[in-house]
Image: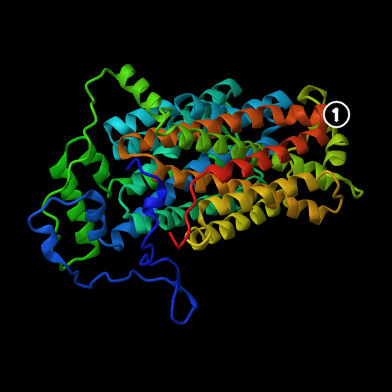
């Protein structure tokens, strides 16, 4: 690709699961069926004698059963990534007595997985750009399941931490590659809306995680396995890895990306994949494309290290510098807020719920000795978790689901830039208001706005990356931006507890200014509207 995303903007109607506007009646409708699946196509002769551009060939494959299964599978991968990364947040209050966790221990637990993601993100971007998307996803998802099983059965804290780190190392591949893999099967007019639909699974994961935690963590059992106690929080980690295994199995039924195959010179395989897609969508029709245009050749003769460095360098050449800086900065800033605050949220909510009088968040935290003191200094430790922690996180999950549906319906009309600005300004205002608000219901609502508003921006930025970078750099670009986002997550989750101890009020204003800065930065990302 390599072109600005404005090139993608025309002719965006036709995707079956989306909001459409009838220009005559001016009535918005939601269309839920696959459109024109059996409708014969016109202009058959244009494919007979000339080679076809890959975008035109993808257009010819239509939109049908294959793409619905693709959206489901990639949605499962996004669900798995979210589940693996954020399930640890529910472990902190449940395991604090068993593991005698101090603030430092909790900070390490919340950040260790993101450290694994961050340290290997560049490597997976290079591997998926040079060795293929599908196999890279399958192998790493399977290893993620094994490492989750290992952490579930680890009898010692240090071993548990090692497995959580390795879990982050392998899940980092999926977090950056899945968007490139999915986008390369979709025609331009379907791409952004389809990716937004798959992102609904992120909201579904955030909604179902507290539901599962509510069902599992309060259970009263203790099984002696290999000399250590198998408690409910260990079972919760095991259950949280089930979607990862499901996503791994589903990938076996999908082919390699046709754009990747074409980029590395495997033209016949790319054409075969396109025929497979077409046969899924149009059973009784012949695929008209006979030959594909070859893209600009990309040299792969360098050794691994040189090739790796060349790919990273290419992202920061003048041609892609603006796109790289804007997307990386936005991912860093949004995940500082959404991920860092989300991982500490169950602990914070526990302190607010214990407050007998109306108080601000910072006043409630300052009175909570269990939150501020180290595990060794606790007078009384309890693994009991109030139901408000689960219910409030369920509300956050619902907010995410609603937000992702809004993204699906609004990405064409408002554009990615406008959605980013609206979400980030709302989150910044809500974060600042937490300094003054004392009503518990109002605090809950503001936290939902902060977490959901900033979190919804992550999927929007990832979608922009698919449009802004060409095939041979796309997975690396996705992984670099995710790396910057995870760096923000690691920094935020590691220092947030200490910042609250140092000065809670200033901490929340720092996060508010961070979100406001991201809103200003969003002005410089490309603009997409229905008119374009």
The residue sitting at 27% across, 50% down in the picture is 253
Depth check: give the residue in front, 386 or 318.
318
Please tell me which residue lies in front, 297 or 440: 297
User: Above or below — where is 351 with respect to 206?
Assistant: above
Q: Is residue 126 above or below residue 243?
A: above
Could you tell whether 5 is left or right of 358 in the image? Answer: left
Q: Quadrant of residue 268?
A: top left
* Residue 245 appears in view: no
Colour treatment of the image: rainbow
Q: Residue at x 82, y 53 (%)?
A: 440
Q: Residue furthest right?
A: 357
Please say whether residue 124 is visible from this viewpoint: yes
Q: Is residue 332 left or right of residue 392?
A: left
Please give the residue where the numbered disc 1 appears in the rendered image: 379
Assign a secondary structure to mark 1: loop
Residue density around tag 1, few if under 14, some if 14–19, many if 20 or more, within 10 Å: few
Q: Residue at x 39, y 49 (%)?
A: 74
Quadrant in which the N terminus appears: top left
On the image, the x and y values in percent for residue 447 come to: 72, 49
310 shown above or below 138: above
């Amino acid at each position: 690709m390599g072109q600005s995303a404005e090139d993608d903007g025309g002719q965006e109607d036709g995707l079956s699961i989306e909001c459409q506007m009838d220009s005559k009646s001016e009535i918005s409708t939601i269309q839920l069926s696959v459109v024109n699946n059996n409708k014969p196509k016109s202009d058959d002769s244009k494919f007979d004698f000339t080679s076809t551009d890959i975008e035109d060939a993808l257009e010819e494959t239509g939109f049908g059963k294959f793409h619905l299964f693709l959206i489901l599978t990639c949605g499962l991968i996004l669900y798995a990534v979210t589940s693996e990364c954020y399930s640890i947040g529910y472990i902190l209050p449940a395991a604090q007595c068993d593991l005698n966790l101090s603030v430092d221990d909790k900070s390490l637990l919340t950040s260790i997985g993101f450290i694994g993601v961050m340290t290997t993100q560049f490597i997976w971007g290079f591997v998926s750009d040079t060795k293929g998307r599908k196999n890279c996803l399958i192998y790493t998802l399977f290893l993620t399941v094994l490492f989750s099983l290992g952490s579930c059965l680890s009898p010692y804290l240090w071993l548990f931490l090692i497995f959580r780190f390795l879990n982050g190392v392998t899940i980092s591949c999926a977090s950056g590659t899945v968007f490139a893999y999915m986008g390369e099967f979709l025609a331009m007019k379907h791409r952004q809306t389809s990716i937004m639909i798959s992102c609904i699974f992120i909201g579904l994961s955030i909604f179902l995680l507290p539901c599962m935690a509510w069902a599992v963590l309060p259970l009263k059992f203790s099984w002696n396995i290999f000399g250590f106690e198998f408690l409910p929080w260990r079972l919760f980690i095991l259950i949280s890895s089930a979607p990862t295994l499901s996503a791994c199995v589903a990938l076996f039924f999908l082919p390699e990306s046709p754009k990747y195959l074409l980029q590395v010179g495997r033209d016949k395989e790319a054409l075969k994949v396109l025929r497979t897609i077409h046969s899924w969508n149009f059973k009784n029709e012949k695929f008209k494309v006979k030959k594909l245009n070859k893209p600009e050749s990309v040299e792969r003769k360098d050794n691994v290290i040189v090739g790796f460095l060349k790919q990273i360098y290419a992202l920061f050449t003048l041609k892609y510098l603006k796109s790289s800086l804007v997307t990386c900065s936005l991912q860093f800033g949004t995940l500082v807020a959404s991920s860092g605050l989300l991982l500490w949220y169950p602990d914070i909510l526990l302190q607010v719920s214990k407050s007998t009088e109306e108080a601000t968040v910072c006043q409630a935290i300052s009175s909570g000795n269990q939150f501020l003191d180290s595990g060794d200094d606790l007078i009384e430790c309890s693994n009991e978790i109030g139901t408000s922690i689960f219910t409030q996180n369920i509300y956050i999950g619902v907010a995410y689901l609603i937000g992702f549906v809004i993204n699906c319906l609004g990405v064409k009309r408002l554009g990615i830039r406008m959605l980013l600005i609206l979400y980030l300004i709302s989150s910044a205002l809500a974060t600042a208001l937490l300094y003054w608000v004392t009503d518990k219901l109002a605090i809950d609502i503001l936290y939902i706005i902060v977490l959901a508003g900033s979190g919804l921006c992550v999927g929007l930025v990832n979608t922009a990356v698919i449009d802004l970078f060409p095939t041979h750099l796309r997975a690396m670009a996705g992984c670099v931006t995710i790396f910057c986002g995870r760096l923000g997550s690691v920094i935020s989750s590691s220092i947030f507890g200490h910042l609250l101890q140092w000065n809670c009020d200033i901490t929340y204003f720092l996060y508010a200014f961070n979100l406001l800065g991201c809103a200003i930065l969003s002005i410089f990302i490309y603009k997409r509207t229905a008119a374009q």
